[in-house]
Image (tube, helix red, strand yellow):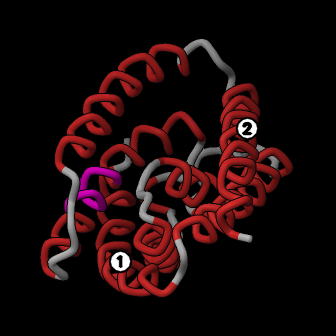
């Protein structure tokens, strides 16, 4: 885990989350999910095509780039209503140069900070929050994290990237299939 990179990404993603959450009010839910699905597919394809490079040393990271990526991830997180590793892991691997195993650990730290910022943003805007659903997602995330960390250790960087990309594309196709009728 790279706390410095994670902290810098979170610092700029938090204002982005706030901006994105205001922007998402203007888009119909089913269309929002379809747009999100296409973004998922584009990122999955880009991740698989990019060659794995050596991990960027903490002292040599391109911090201005990390700050910019943090802001973009924040806007996307607020706009689409997601703040998970799907957006952060690719930003950390492709943009910050971290190997995927290190990026996954760092993303968990950023996810916690972004989730708190998103929650505060919705509270400030007096937007409804379905707490039972939030609790279920948090519990599911913790269980998934526990299992995923153990599974990830058995994959090479390349294998983990490909598996991540396949899962992302499958979820994206599901989202398109479920939401396309409501968007038309």
Q: Which residues are magenta?
A: 111-116
* Number of marks in picture: 2
Q: Looking at the image, is 112 positioned above or below residue 81?
A: above
- Which residue is painted at 41% across and 38% down in the image? 105
The local secondary structure at tag 2 comes to: helix
Image coords of residue 88 (percent x, y): 50, 56
Image coords of residue 107 (percent x, y): 41, 48
Q: Residue 63, can we see it?
A: no
Image coords of residue 139 (percent x, y): 26, 30
- Which residue is painted at 49% across and 67% down in the image? 80
Quarter of the rendering occupied by the C terminus: bottom right
The local secondary structure at tag 1 comes to: helix
Q: Looking at the image, is 74 positioned above or below residue 163?
A: below
Residue of label 2: 170
Query: Does 112 lie within the magenta span?
Result: yes
What is the magenta segment's predominant secondary structure? Answer: helix
Asked where in the image residue 12 lies, by quadrant, the reply is bottom left
């Amino acid at each position: 885990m790279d706390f410095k990179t994670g902290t810098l990404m979170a610092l700029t993603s938090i204002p982005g989350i706030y901006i994105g959450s205001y922007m998402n009010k203007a888009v119909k839910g089913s269309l929002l999910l379809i747009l999100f699905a296409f973004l998922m597919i584009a990122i999955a394809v880009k991740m698989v095509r990019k060659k794995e490079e050596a991990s960027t040393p903490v002292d040599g990271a391109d911090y201005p780039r990390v700050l910019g990526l943090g802001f973009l991830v924040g806007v996307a997180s607020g706009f689409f209503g997601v703040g998970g590793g799907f957006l952060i892991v690719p930003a950390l691997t492709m943009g910050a140069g971290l190997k995927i195993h290190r990026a996954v650990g760092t993303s968990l730290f950023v996810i916690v900070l972004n989730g708190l910022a998103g929650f505060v943003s919705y509270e400030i805007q007096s937007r409804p929050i379905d707490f039972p659903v939030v609790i279920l997602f948090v519990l599911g995330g913790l269980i998934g994290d526990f299992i995923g960390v153990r599974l990830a250790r058995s994959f090479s960087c390349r294998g983990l990237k490909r598996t991540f990309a396949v899962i992302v594309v499958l979820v994206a196709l599901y989202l398109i299939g479920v939401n396309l009728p409501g968007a038309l």
